[in-house]
């Protein structure tokens, strides 16, 4: 989770990649050479965040199922 937070902060910081992309869009000559690599780097970073988020989601789902199982077991042991 901290990886995603740190990545998001660095992307939206004043000198972050999003700010740089906006600056590139204001200069067509600079954008011609630097926009594509910057967008590719942004995609790569986004994919890393997606992988991390998917892993976090899987962990939450696992623990949710464990809790459901414990609840069911405890209720069945208690009886009617």
Image (cartoon, rainbow, N blue to C red):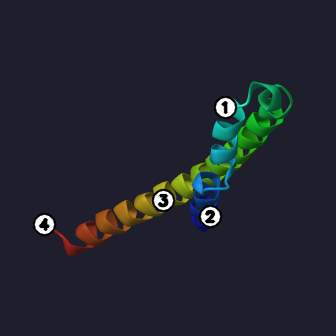
| Residue at the disc numbered 3 | 60
How many other residues sit within 10 Å of disc 4, few (<14), some (14-19) or many (≥20)? few
Q: Nearer the viewer, mark 4 or mark 2?
A: 2
Pick the front one: 48 or 77? 48
Numbered circle sitting on residue 80: 4
Residue at 61 percent of width and 56 percent of height: 14
User: Position of 35 compared to 56: left or right?
Assistant: right
Going from N to C along the chain, the mark reached first, 4 or 3, is 3
Alpha carbon distance from label 2 to label 1: 27 Å
Q: Residue at x 29, y 72 (%)?
A: 74
Specify which label sits upstream in the sequence, 4 or 1.
1
Q: Nearer the viewer, residue 43 or 10?
A: 10
Q: Residue at x 41, y 60 (%)?
A: 64
Q: Of callouts 2 and 1, which one flags the residue occurring earlier in the amino acid sequence?
A: 2
The residue beneath circle 1 is 26
Residue 60 coordinates in the image, percent (x, y): 48, 59
Q: Position of residue 43 (x, y in %)?
A: 71, 38
Locate the N terminus by quadrant: bottom right
Is the C-beta separation of discs 4 and 3 under 8 Å?
no
Residue pointed to by mark 2: 6
Count residues near mark 2 (Cα–Cα under 10 Å), then give few for <14, some for 14-19, many for 20+: few
- The answer for how far apart the CA atoms under marks 4 and 2 are is 50 Å
Label 3 element class: helix
Q: Residues within 10 Å of mark 3 (few under 14, many from 20)?
A: few
Front position among marks 3 and 2: 2
Judged left or right of residue 40, residue 11 is left
| Quadrant placement of the C terminus | bottom left
């Amino acid at each position: 989770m901290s990886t995603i937070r740190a990545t998001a902060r660095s992307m939206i910081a004043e000198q972050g990649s999003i700010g740089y992309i906006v600056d590139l869009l204001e200069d067509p000559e600079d954008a011609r050479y630097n926009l594509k690599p910057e967008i590719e780097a942004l995609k790569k970073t986004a994919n890393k965040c997606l992988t991390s988020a998917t892993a976090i989601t899987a962990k939450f789902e696992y623990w949710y199922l464990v809790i459901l199982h414990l609840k069911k077991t405890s209720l069945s042991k208690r009886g009617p």
